Image: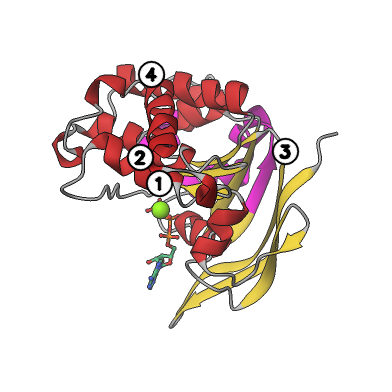
Amino acid sequence: MASTILRVEDVVKRFGGITALKGVTMEVYEGEILGLIGPNGAGKTTLFNVITGVYKPDRGKVYFKGKDITGLPPHKIARLGVARTFQIVKPFKGLTVLENVTAAVFYGPRGDEYSFKAAEEKAMEVLRLVGLEDHADTLATRLNVAMKKRLELARALAQDPELLLLDEALAGLNPREVSAMLEIIRKVREERRVTMIMVEHVMHAVMNVSDRIVVLHLGEKIAEGSPEAVARDPRVVEAYLGDPELALRFVRRLGGGA
Ligand SMILES: Nc1ncnc2c1ncn2[C@@H]1O[C@H](COP(=O)(O)OP(=O)(O)OP(=O)(O)O)[C@@H](O)[C@H]1O
Ligand SMILES: [Mg+2]
Protein backbone atom coordinates (compact mmCIF):
# COMPACT_ATOMS: atom_id res chain seq x y z
CA MET A 1 0.00 0.00 0.00
CA ALA A 2 1.40 3.38 -1.02
CA SER A 3 1.95 5.97 1.67
CA THR A 4 -0.15 9.08 2.09
CA ILE A 5 1.36 12.22 0.57
CA LEU A 6 -1.55 14.56 1.33
CA ARG A 7 -4.24 14.41 3.97
CA VAL A 8 -7.11 16.89 4.11
CA GLU A 9 -8.94 16.64 7.40
CA ASP A 10 -12.41 18.01 8.09
CA VAL A 11 -11.82 21.17 6.05
CA VAL A 12 -14.46 23.90 6.23
CA LYS A 13 -14.25 27.05 4.12
CA ARG A 14 -16.89 29.78 4.21
CA PHE A 15 -17.33 32.84 2.02
CA GLY A 16 -19.78 35.08 3.84
CA GLY A 17 -23.05 33.15 3.81
CA ILE A 18 -21.77 30.40 1.47
CA THR A 19 -20.06 27.35 2.91
CA ALA A 20 -17.96 26.19 -0.04
CA LEU A 21 -16.41 23.24 1.86
CA LYS A 22 -18.39 21.54 4.60
CA GLY A 23 -15.94 19.28 6.40
CA VAL A 24 -14.02 17.55 3.61
CA THR A 25 -11.68 14.71 4.54
CA MET A 26 -9.60 12.89 1.96
CA GLU A 27 -6.22 11.33 1.35
CA VAL A 28 -3.97 11.23 -1.67
CA TYR A 29 -1.49 8.37 -2.02
CA GLU A 30 2.02 8.76 -3.31
CA GLY A 31 2.26 8.16 -7.07
CA GLU A 32 -1.44 8.12 -7.83
CA ILE A 33 -3.56 10.26 -10.09
CA LEU A 34 -6.63 11.23 -8.10
CA GLY A 35 -9.55 12.60 -10.10
CA LEU A 36 -11.49 15.26 -8.21
CA ILE A 37 -14.87 15.76 -9.83
CA GLY A 38 -18.19 17.38 -9.04
CA PRO A 39 -20.72 19.76 -10.60
CA ASN A 40 -20.02 23.50 -10.93
CA GLY A 41 -19.69 25.17 -7.57
CA ALA A 42 -18.94 21.88 -5.77
CA GLY A 43 -15.88 23.39 -4.08
CA LYS A 44 -13.10 21.82 -6.16
CA THR A 45 -11.13 24.98 -6.86
CA THR A 46 -11.73 26.15 -3.29
CA LEU A 47 -10.18 22.91 -2.03
CA PHE A 48 -7.13 23.53 -4.26
CA ASN A 49 -6.94 27.05 -2.85
CA VAL A 50 -7.00 25.71 0.71
CA ILE A 51 -4.36 23.05 -0.04
CA THR A 52 -2.03 25.59 -1.69
CA GLY A 53 -2.46 28.25 1.01
CA VAL A 54 -4.44 30.78 -1.03
CA TYR A 55 -7.23 30.44 1.56
CA LYS A 56 -6.91 29.53 5.21
CA PRO A 57 -9.68 27.09 6.14
CA ASP A 58 -12.20 28.11 8.82
CA ARG A 59 -11.76 24.66 10.31
CA GLY A 60 -9.71 21.56 9.63
CA LYS A 61 -6.17 20.66 8.65
CA VAL A 62 -4.02 19.98 5.62
CA TYR A 63 -1.01 17.68 6.00
CA PHE A 64 1.62 17.30 3.27
CA LYS A 65 3.99 14.38 3.84
CA GLY A 66 2.86 14.31 7.45
CA LYS A 67 3.63 17.99 8.05
CA ASP A 68 0.85 20.36 9.03
CA ILE A 69 0.79 23.01 6.27
CA THR A 70 -2.58 24.52 7.19
CA GLY A 71 -2.56 28.26 6.64
CA LEU A 72 1.04 28.51 5.41
CA PRO A 73 1.46 31.15 2.67
CA PRO A 74 1.43 29.87 -0.94
CA HIS A 75 5.13 30.45 -1.61
CA LYS A 76 6.10 28.34 1.41
CA ILE A 77 3.79 25.51 0.32
CA ALA A 78 5.26 25.70 -3.20
CA ARG A 79 8.72 25.41 -1.69
CA LEU A 80 7.69 22.22 0.07
CA GLY A 81 6.91 20.63 -3.30
CA VAL A 82 3.27 21.38 -4.11
CA ALA A 83 2.54 23.03 -7.47
CA ARG A 84 -0.73 23.84 -9.17
CA THR A 85 -2.16 25.02 -12.43
CA PHE A 86 -4.96 27.56 -12.64
CA GLN A 87 -8.40 27.06 -14.14
CA ILE A 88 -7.98 30.46 -15.79
CA VAL A 89 -4.48 30.34 -17.27
CA LYS A 90 -2.40 33.36 -16.37
CA PRO A 91 1.05 33.51 -17.94
CA PHE A 92 3.17 36.60 -17.36
CA LYS A 93 2.28 39.00 -20.14
CA GLY A 94 5.17 40.35 -22.20
CA LEU A 95 7.31 37.27 -21.49
CA THR A 96 8.06 34.46 -23.89
CA VAL A 97 7.13 30.85 -23.22
CA LEU A 98 10.69 30.05 -22.15
CA GLU A 99 10.88 33.12 -19.88
CA ASN A 100 7.60 32.17 -18.21
CA VAL A 101 8.81 28.66 -17.44
CA THR A 102 12.29 29.83 -16.40
CA ALA A 103 10.74 32.19 -13.84
CA ALA A 104 8.72 29.31 -12.42
CA VAL A 105 11.85 27.24 -11.73
CA PHE A 106 12.77 29.64 -8.93
CA TYR A 107 9.54 28.98 -7.00
CA GLY A 108 10.25 25.27 -6.52
CA PRO A 109 11.79 23.47 -3.53
CA ARG A 110 15.34 23.90 -4.88
CA GLY A 111 14.62 27.19 -6.63
CA ASP A 112 17.38 28.98 -4.70
CA GLU A 113 20.05 26.68 -6.07
CA TYR A 114 19.57 27.54 -9.74
CA SER A 115 21.69 29.97 -11.73
CA PHE A 116 19.75 31.71 -14.47
CA LYS A 117 21.40 29.52 -17.10
CA ALA A 118 20.62 26.31 -15.23
CA ALA A 119 17.03 27.46 -14.74
CA GLU A 120 16.74 28.10 -18.46
CA GLU A 121 18.09 24.64 -19.24
CA LYS A 122 15.63 23.10 -16.85
CA ALA A 123 12.82 25.13 -18.43
CA MET A 124 13.78 23.85 -21.90
CA GLU A 125 13.73 20.28 -20.61
CA VAL A 126 10.20 20.82 -19.27
CA LEU A 127 9.12 22.45 -22.56
CA ARG A 128 10.29 19.31 -24.37
CA LEU A 129 8.31 17.15 -21.95
CA VAL A 130 5.09 19.03 -22.72
CA GLY A 131 5.84 19.45 -26.45
CA LEU A 132 6.29 23.22 -26.40
CA GLU A 133 9.99 23.35 -27.36
CA ASP A 134 9.23 24.82 -30.78
CA HIS A 135 7.35 27.70 -29.12
CA ALA A 136 10.07 28.64 -26.63
CA ASP A 137 10.53 32.12 -28.08
CA THR A 138 6.85 32.83 -28.71
CA LEU A 139 5.16 35.44 -26.52
CA ALA A 140 3.03 33.45 -24.05
CA THR A 141 -0.04 35.55 -24.78
CA ARG A 142 0.13 34.55 -28.46
CA LEU A 143 -0.33 30.83 -27.82
CA ASN A 144 -3.66 29.18 -28.61
CA VAL A 145 -5.76 27.66 -25.80
CA ALA A 146 -4.25 24.18 -26.07
CA MET A 147 -0.71 25.53 -26.00
CA LYS A 148 -1.55 27.88 -23.11
CA LYS A 149 -2.76 24.85 -21.14
CA ARG A 150 0.55 23.13 -21.84
CA LEU A 151 2.43 26.23 -20.75
CA GLU A 152 0.43 26.27 -17.52
CA LEU A 153 1.45 22.65 -16.93
CA ALA A 154 5.08 23.43 -17.82
CA ARG A 155 5.19 26.28 -15.31
CA ALA A 156 3.99 23.96 -12.56
CA LEU A 157 6.42 21.19 -13.56
CA ALA A 158 9.34 23.63 -13.62
CA GLN A 159 8.97 23.76 -9.84
CA ASP A 160 9.80 20.05 -9.62
CA PRO A 161 6.73 19.31 -7.53
CA GLU A 162 6.07 16.06 -5.69
CA LEU A 163 2.37 16.87 -5.72
CA LEU A 164 0.74 18.59 -8.66
CA LEU A 165 -2.79 19.99 -8.63
CA LEU A 166 -4.33 20.34 -12.09
CA ASP A 167 -7.41 22.55 -12.28
CA GLU A 168 -9.26 21.76 -15.51
CA ALA A 169 -6.16 21.19 -17.64
CA LEU A 170 -8.40 19.81 -20.41
CA ALA A 171 -11.08 22.53 -20.47
CA GLY A 172 -11.60 24.07 -23.89
CA LEU A 173 -9.53 21.46 -25.73
CA ASN A 174 -10.79 19.49 -28.72
CA PRO A 175 -10.71 15.65 -28.57
CA ARG A 176 -7.33 15.42 -30.28
CA GLU A 177 -5.84 17.98 -27.90
CA VAL A 178 -7.39 16.17 -24.92
CA SER A 179 -5.68 12.92 -25.99
CA ALA A 180 -2.36 14.70 -26.40
CA MET A 181 -2.65 16.30 -22.96
CA LEU A 182 -3.54 12.96 -21.35
CA GLU A 183 -0.42 11.43 -22.91
CA ILE A 184 1.65 14.24 -21.40
CA ILE A 185 0.03 13.75 -17.99
CA ARG A 186 0.76 10.00 -18.09
CA LYS A 187 4.34 10.71 -19.12
CA VAL A 188 4.75 13.16 -16.25
CA ARG A 189 3.65 10.51 -13.80
CA GLU A 190 5.88 7.84 -15.29
CA GLU A 191 9.02 9.88 -15.88
CA ARG A 192 8.81 12.25 -12.93
CA ARG A 193 6.86 10.15 -10.43
CA VAL A 194 4.66 13.16 -9.66
CA THR A 195 1.50 12.54 -7.65
CA MET A 196 -1.48 14.39 -9.12
CA ILE A 197 -4.91 15.62 -8.19
CA MET A 198 -6.84 16.37 -11.32
CA VAL A 199 -9.97 18.52 -11.21
CA GLU A 200 -11.82 17.83 -14.40
CA HIS A 201 -15.19 18.07 -16.12
CA VAL A 202 -14.12 16.07 -19.19
CA MET A 203 -15.56 12.86 -17.74
CA HIS A 204 -14.26 10.16 -20.09
CA ALA A 205 -10.76 11.60 -19.75
CA VAL A 206 -10.66 11.85 -15.96
CA MET A 207 -12.29 8.43 -15.59
CA ASN A 208 -9.69 7.01 -17.96
CA VAL A 209 -6.53 8.49 -16.47
CA SER A 210 -7.35 8.42 -12.72
CA ASP A 211 -6.51 5.62 -10.32
CA ARG A 212 -9.18 6.82 -7.90
CA ILE A 213 -11.95 9.39 -7.94
CA VAL A 214 -13.28 11.68 -5.23
CA VAL A 215 -16.62 13.37 -5.85
CA LEU A 216 -17.53 16.69 -4.27
CA HIS A 217 -21.06 18.06 -4.33
CA LEU A 218 -22.12 21.31 -2.64
CA GLY A 219 -18.99 21.28 -0.50
CA GLU A 220 -19.26 17.68 0.65
CA LYS A 221 -17.49 14.51 -0.38
CA ILE A 222 -20.31 12.28 -1.63
CA ALA A 223 -18.32 9.41 -3.10
CA GLU A 224 -14.82 8.00 -3.38
CA GLY A 225 -13.41 4.92 -5.09
CA SER A 226 -12.41 3.40 -8.40
CA PRO A 227 -13.65 5.21 -11.53
CA GLU A 228 -15.98 2.28 -12.27
CA ALA A 229 -17.51 2.23 -8.78
CA VAL A 230 -17.94 6.00 -8.67
CA ALA A 231 -19.56 6.18 -12.12
CA ARG A 232 -22.19 3.68 -10.96
CA ASP A 233 -22.84 5.34 -7.61
CA PRO A 234 -26.46 6.59 -7.58
CA ARG A 235 -25.50 9.62 -5.44
CA VAL A 236 -22.98 10.67 -8.06
CA VAL A 237 -25.34 10.25 -11.00
CA GLU A 238 -27.97 12.21 -9.07
CA ALA A 239 -25.52 15.03 -8.29
CA TYR A 240 -24.91 15.44 -12.00
CA LEU A 241 -28.56 15.31 -13.02
CA GLY A 242 -28.78 19.08 -12.70
CA ASP A 243 -26.44 19.16 -15.67
CA PRO A 244 -28.09 17.14 -18.45
CA GLU A 245 -24.98 16.91 -20.61
CA LEU A 246 -22.80 15.53 -17.84
CA ALA A 247 -25.56 13.20 -16.67
CA LEU A 248 -25.80 11.87 -20.21
CA ARG A 249 -22.09 11.16 -20.28
CA PHE A 250 -22.44 9.19 -17.06
CA VAL A 251 -25.32 7.20 -18.50
CA ARG A 252 -23.29 6.45 -21.63
CA ARG A 253 -20.39 5.37 -19.47
CA LEU A 254 -22.75 3.02 -17.64
CA GLY A 255 -23.60 1.42 -20.96
CA GLY A 256 -27.10 2.82 -21.14
CA GLY A 257 -26.54 4.48 -24.52
CA ALA A 258 -27.73 7.97 -25.42
N1 LIG B 1 -13.56 34.02 -3.44
C1 LIG B 1 -14.84 33.66 -3.31
N2 LIG B 1 -15.76 34.48 -2.76
C2 LIG B 1 -17.05 34.10 -2.61
N3 LIG B 1 -17.53 32.90 -2.99
C3 LIG B 1 -16.67 32.04 -3.54
C4 LIG B 1 -15.28 32.35 -3.74
N4 LIG B 1 -14.67 31.30 -4.31
C5 LIG B 1 -15.62 30.37 -4.47
N5 LIG B 1 -16.81 30.79 -4.01
C6 LIG B 1 -18.08 30.03 -3.98
O1 LIG B 1 -17.79 28.78 -3.40
C7 LIG B 1 -18.49 27.73 -4.07
C8 LIG B 1 -17.49 26.74 -4.62
O2 LIG B 1 -16.78 27.34 -5.69
P1 LIG B 1 -15.57 26.64 -6.43
O3 LIG B 1 -14.99 27.63 -7.35
O4 LIG B 1 -14.67 26.02 -5.45
O5 LIG B 1 -16.33 25.49 -7.25
P2 LIG B 1 -15.78 24.49 -8.34
O6 LIG B 1 -16.14 23.12 -7.88
O7 LIG B 1 -14.35 24.75 -8.64
O8 LIG B 1 -16.69 24.85 -9.60
P3 LIG B 1 -16.35 24.88 -11.18
O9 LIG B 1 -16.46 23.45 -11.63
O10 LIG B 1 -17.44 25.73 -11.74
O11 LIG B 1 -14.99 25.46 -11.36
C9 LIG B 1 -19.33 28.41 -5.14
O12 LIG B 1 -20.61 28.62 -4.58
C10 LIG B 1 -18.61 29.72 -5.37
O13 LIG B 1 -19.49 30.70 -5.82
MG1 LIG C 1 -13.31 25.37 -10.28
Q: CA distance from mark 3 to mark 1?
A: 23 Å
Which SS does the magenta portion mostly show? helix
What secondary structure is marked by label 3? loop
* Residue 88 position in % (x across, y down): 30, 50
Residue at (59, 78) in percent of width and height: 58
Which of these two is toward me, 252 or 62? 62
Instruction: Measure how far apart labels 2 and 4 are at the Cα level.
Output: 20 Å
Q: Position of residue 244 (x, y in %)?
A: 36, 40
The three-letter amino acid code for the residue at tag 3 is: Glu
Q: Could one spot residue 128 in this view of the protein?
A: yes
Q: Is residue 237 magenta?
A: yes
Q: Secondary structure at mark 2?
A: helix
Q: Reading the chain from its start, which is encountered first: label 4 or label 3?
A: 3
Given residues 197 and 25, the one toward you in this image is 197
Which residue is disc 1 drawn over? 104
Residue placed at 51% from the left, 49% from the top?
111
Count of numbered circles on the image: 4
Q: Nearer the viewer, mark 2 or mark 3?
A: 2
Question: Which residue is at the front of the view, 140 or 34?
Answer: 140
Determine the CA span between mark 4 and mark 3: 24 Å
Q: Which residue is mark 4?
A: 180
Residue that label 3 marks: 30
User: Over which residues does the magenta segment extend?
Assistant: 222-249
Q: Residues within 10 Å of mark 1 (few under 14, many from 20)?
A: many
**Earlier-in-chain disc, 2 versus 3:** 3
Residue type at mark 2?
Val
- Which label lies toward us, 2 or 4? 2
- For the point 59% across and 30% down, the residue is 210
The numbered disc on residue 192 is: none
Between residue 30 and residue 230, name the one nearer to us.
30
* Amino acid at dot 1: Ala
